[in-house]
Amino acid sequence: MTTKLKKTNKTKDMKLNTHIHKAALTVLCILSLSPALMVAAGSPKPIEERGVIKSVDMNAHILVVTEPKKNAERKFQWNDQTKFNERDKSIGASDLKAGERVRLTYLPAGDTPILRSVHIAPAKTETHSGKSPSSARSNGAQA
């Protein structure tokens, strides 16, 4: 009879150990995933906006854009990771000119959002004539 009692106690101990191991494993899994979840939840999603360039400050890396629909101005800042392009060609910040239409992608950050990308949109007259803004600039410079 004592052997049956010992086997029963041993079985209960094994079941208890199994439950403890499962609980510990679950806790470890949750803790290992929590930093990734925190980063994913805390990282802001990029926002896209369109507007017209009002001014470009090359020293402060500030771009001021007017939103025609809202008639409002917004300041944006660029950094070394910001990509500038025009018709799928990479350009520099120095190529930005007041009056150009742009599509911006940025991350909200404080008072001045950080630009991820700036895409110069073709002028409305250039979309119909087939001229690229680059050729329009170079033609204007040669005249």
Image (cartoon, helix red, strand yellow):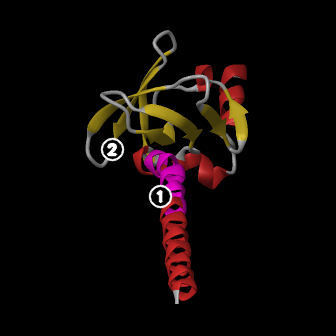
The percent coordinates of residue 125 (x first, y second) are 56, 48
- Name the residue tied to disc 1: 27
The percent coordinates of residue 70 (x first, y second) are 26, 46
Crowding at dot 1, Cα within 10 Å, few <14 / some 14-19 / many 20+, comes out as: few
Residue 62 falls in image quadrant: top left
- Name the residue tied to disc 2: 68
Looking at this view, is 53 or 1 the one in front? Answer: 1
Magenta stretch, overall SS: helix
Residue 25 shows in this picture: yes
Which residue lies at the image location 57% right of the left edge and 39% below the top edge?
120
Looking at this view, is 68 or 109 the one in front? Answer: 109
Q: Which mark is residue 123?
A: none
The percent coordinates of residue 54 (x first, y second) are 40, 27
Is residue 75 shown in magenta?
no
Residue 135, compared with residue 20, is above or below; it is: above
What is the span of residues highlighted in magenta in the rendered image? 25-39
Residue 48 shows in this picture: no
Furthest toward the front, the residue is 1
Asked which secondary structure carries label 1, the reply is helix
Q: Earlier in the sequence, mark 2 or mark 1?
A: 1
Q: Amino acid at mark 2?
A: Pro
Asked which secondary structure carries label 2, the reply is loop
The percent coordinates of residue 89 (x first, y second) are 73, 38
Furthest toward the left, the residue is 71
